[in-house]
Amino acid sequence: MACSWLLVVAGFVIGCSSGPTAGFSTGPGDPRVVGTWRLAERGFFQDSVYTIRIDTVNYNRDTTFYVIRRYGTTNPQTLTFEHDGKLTTEGSEVSYYRPINNYRVDPDALRPDSDTLRLNLFISTNGANVRFQQALRVRQDSLLIIPPCNACYIKFVRSQ
């Protein structure tokens, strides 16, 4: 009886140590995006909460405004799309993409009359690979990722 429990526990430990995501691959990377890209510009909405005082009463104001932030070449923030479909990041401004291990670019455009592609990003979490999509435009030495928020974008330039 003790031997069978030992086998069950050993099987459980071995099963947990080799996760199903270890051999996950999206296939070869897309040659249009393969390489290292440096963050150049981001457009996004930012909330601002502040207090104004009218007479003796304080009022909280909550506003949203659009921000365009540009990034220089010092302290580069980069995404690297590998030939084998792997994605790596460097820098705090691209930390959103840090948990993403793999990518795949769909060969078809989002719309027939568009140059916007689908970027599939894969997060390995809890033994599963979770896919989500963002729009992508590649033009010569610039790459534009368009997250699902309205009017947001992340612009990269090819790193030398």
Image (spheres, rainbow, N blue to C red):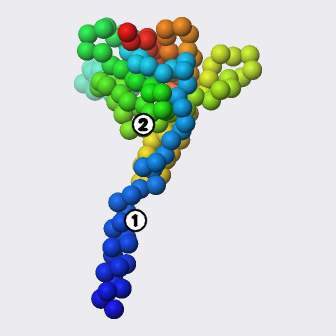
Residue holding disc 1: 15
Q: Nearer the viewer, residue 57 or 159?
A: 159
Asked which quadrant contains residue 48, the reply is top left
Measured as percent of width and height from the top left, residue 54 is found at: 30, 20
* SS of the residue under disc 2: strand
Left or right, residue 123 beside residue 119:
left
Q: Amino acid at mark 2?
A: Ile
Asked which quadrant contains residue 90, the reply is top left
Measured as percent of width and height from the top left, residue 142 is found at: 49, 10
- Using the image, determine if residue 125 lies above or below residue 107: below
- Using the image, determine if residue 7 lies above or below residue 133: below
Q: Nearer the viewer, residue 3 or 109?
A: 3
In three-dimensional space, the C-alpha distance between marks 2 and 1, rounded to whole angstroms, equals: 24 Å
Q: Residue at left 27%, top 21%?
A: 53
Left or right, residue 94 beside residue 129:
left
Precedes in sequence: disc 2 or disc 1: 1
The image's mark for residue 100 is 2
The image's mark for residue 89 is none
Q: Residue at left 46%, top 48%?
A: 23
Q: Amino acid at mark 1?
A: Gly
- Using the image, determine if residue 18 lies above or below residue 53: below
Measured as percent of width and height from the top left, residue 46 is found at: 40, 22
